[in-house]
């Protein structure tokens, strides 16, 4: 399977969909209606209320929507990865890794605010990589700020992604205070519309605007299967990190900065998880994008495919056992 996805052929795009369907078929066997959490913000509540009106609470429709979102995210992530040559040769390993990672825990296949956020953050990551060669970055930075602000209107802890924007500017651009102000202005722009909505609807109150943020420690894994899922998340990440570090001197400067940006992405995603703990693992899916990049490196760089294939099939065996037989 690794050898197949190492190639960039049109048929592999269809194979990726089939691969996702096999791993995520339990979404349709055990569909779940999304539940609002206290951390879900205004925009997600509006979206969910609209979907409830359309789907009338039928769980399988949400599973279909989540599946489509995951396919779109994997495809978009893969195309961006190849377009920017983050790995030396084009392939489908980033998309495959994203599908594989989001199958490790059942909660990561549920329709949720963090799952929606991944779609936006993949695009934000792409726009931030493009800043390195941009001669007029003001418009792009403002757009990045707007999308990051929208993310925080979906999920309150995602306000931490403002740190990713600021740290990303430090990593990808020379320090210019004007660009920082443009990014901050873009981040606050969606909130102008929120303030207008709250004022006109008679819900204006500082308690409705200022979020309640509490840093907590994630709950211990509830079962051995969750623990194994975390292990299969970390092991390929460490292997991929080793190969990225080993080949770092061969990369162009922009590619090095792209990998640095992915590490910053992961650090901020961990921070998001630490804010306002929820009673499920749905918010952990925010880490899937940077983890998928390093997993792809773990499958791509070894010259012999035996090791990556064994690792891949062990993870697939765990996913099948957990989703179909547990």
Image: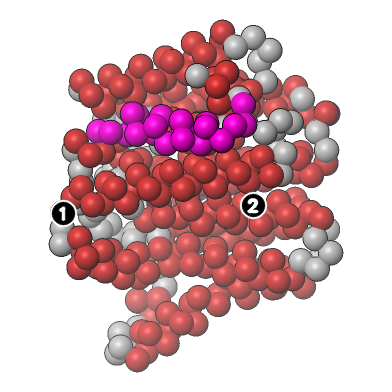
Crowd rating for badge 2 (residues with CA inside 10 Å; few <14, some 14–19, many 20+)? some
Q: Quadrant of residue 316?
A: top left
Q: Residue 58 — which label?
A: 1
**Residue positioned 23% across, 52% down in the render:** 61
Q: Is residue 110 left or right of residue 255?
A: left
Q: Which residues are magenta?
A: 7-26
Relative height, residue 259 to residue 246 (above, below): below
**Residue positioned 29% across, 60% down in the render:** 38
Q: Which residue is mark 2?
A: 126
Q: Is residue 117 left or right of residue 65?
A: right
Relative height, residue 7 to residue 95 (above, below): above
**Residue positioned 35% across, 44% down in the render:** 67
Q: Quadrant of residue 4?
A: top right
Structure colour scheme: secondary structure
Is 194 in the magenta?
no
Asked if residue 122 can be seen in this view, the reply is: yes
SS for callout 1: loop
Location of residue 14 in the rendering, given as x and y in whole percent from the top left corner? 46, 35
């Amino acid at each position: 399977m690794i050898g197949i996805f190492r190639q960039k052929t049109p048929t592999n795009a269809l194979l990726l969909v089939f691969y996702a369907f096999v791993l995520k078929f339990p979404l349709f066997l055990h569909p779940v209606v999304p539940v609002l959490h206290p951390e879900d913000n205004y925009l997600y509540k509006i979206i969910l209320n609209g979907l409830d009106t359309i789907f009338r609470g039928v769980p399988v429709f949400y599973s279909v929507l989540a599946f489509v979102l995951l396919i779109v995210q994997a495809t978009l992530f893969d195309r961006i990865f190849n377009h920017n040559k983050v790995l030396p040769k084009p392939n489908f390993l980033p998309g495959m890794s994203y599908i594989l990672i989001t199958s490790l825990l059942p909660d990561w296949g549920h329709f949720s605010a963090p799952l929606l956020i991944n779609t936006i953050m993949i695009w934000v990551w792409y726009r931030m990589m493009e800043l390195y060669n941009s001669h007029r970055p003001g418009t792009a930075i403002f757009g990045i700020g707007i999308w990051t602000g929208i993310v925080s209107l979906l999920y309150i802890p995602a306000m931490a992604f403002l740190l990713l924007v600021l740290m990303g500017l430090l990593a990808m651009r020379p320090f210019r205070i004007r660009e920082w102000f443009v990014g901050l202005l873009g981040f606050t722009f969606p909130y102008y519309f929120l303030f207008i909505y709250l004022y006109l609807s008679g819900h204006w109150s500082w308690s409705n605007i200022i979020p309640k943020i509490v840093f907590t420690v994630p709950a211990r894994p509830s079962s051995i299967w969750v623990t194994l899922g975390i292990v299969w998340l970390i092991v390929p990440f460490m292997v991929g990190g080793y190969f990225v570090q080993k080949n770092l001197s061969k990369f162009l400067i922009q590619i090095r900065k792209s990998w640095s940006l992915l590490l910053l992405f992961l650090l901020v995603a961990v921070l998001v998880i630490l804010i306002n703990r929820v009673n499920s693992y749905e918010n952990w899916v925010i880490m899937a994008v940077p983890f998928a990049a390093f997993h792809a490196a773990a499958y791509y760089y070894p010259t012999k495919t035996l090791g990556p294939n064994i690792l891949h099939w062990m993870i697939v065996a765990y996913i099948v056992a957990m989703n179909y037989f547990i």
